[in-house]
Image: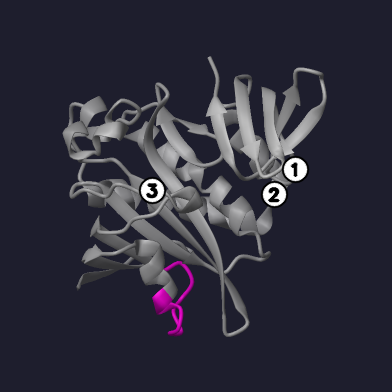
Amino acid sequence: MKTGEFHDPNRKVAGRTIWHFDAVESTNETAKELLEEDLEEGLVIWADRQSAGRGRQGRAWASPPGGLYVSTIFRPKEAQAWVLGLLMGMPVVKALRHFGVFAGLKYPNDAVYQDRKIAGILSEGVYRRDRYHVIVGIGVNTNVGLDQLPPDLQARATTLKKEVNLFVANDEFLDYLLNQMDELYSRYNHTRVEFLLKDYRGQCTTIGKRVAATTPKGTVTGKAYDIAPNGALVIIDDRNAKHEFVDGELKILP
């Protein structure tokens, strides 16, 4: 049920209008359903709970009460849902750092603190009425206790509530996050993507680590070396051969 609507005319695109829901199955799926209507770009779907939240590769995303679950509708200059989703990890990291958690980005789009996941981003490209849209979904473990997460996640996840002594309200966190997303999206529309990917590289904790990347073509083991101009992770394997990894399973090795 939609419980509120908020407007901020000071933002350029992202977050000018926010629709708040008590609970939805998935904020991304709700945004897709709403695309049948003529909605303004930058509309934010914000829910207090998700009953069927999703992460990358169809994985379930735990969405207990207290967390922040939002999706934003964009109509970017190019059909680059994946790259835009990659870049949107940077505003999430900025928001977490602003509120006291010095997070970084695990490639491609998990925000982590001390190797524990605290937030995730899922971007999806959708065509409606011959128009291309990108829905960027963000889930942040804000006011969530570790005991609210599934047992298998508790050892490899963390929350803002656990790491910061002061209480941070979700609406306060969201306000700061949307300001950063709005700024990033403006840069995305007026700056070469390669420049933004250099900024992403500076926040990516995967660079320099030994990784195993599993794709349909097989598994590549080596050192995460760089971010390519197309957003791919550049891996140099044990034979000094260079590979570009975009989608699949990526593990950080000891």
Query: Label 2's element?
Result: helix
Q: In 3D space, how far apart are the residues under numbered discs 1 and 2 (Cα atoms)? A: 8 Å
Q: Are marks 3 and 1 in contact (CB under 8 Å)?
A: no
- Disc 1 marks which residue? 229
Q: Residue at x 62, y 36 (%)?
A: 214
Amino acid at circle 1: Pro
- Tell me which segment is drawn in magenta: 33-43
The answer to whether residue 42 is magenta is yes
Q: Is residue 94 rendered to the left or right of residue 62?
A: right
Q: Where is residue 32 in the image (x, y as percent from the top left)?
A: 44, 72
Q: Where is residue 68 in the image (x, y as percent from the top left)?
A: 28, 50
Q: Are marks 1 and 2 in contact (CB under 8 Å)?
A: yes
Q: In 3D space, how far apart are the residues under numbered discs 2 and 3 (Cα atoms)? A: 21 Å
The answer to which image quadrant residue 3 occupies is: bottom left
- Disc 3 marks which residue? 177
What secondary structure do most residues of the magenta stretch adopt?
Answer: loop
- Disc 2 marks which residue? 193
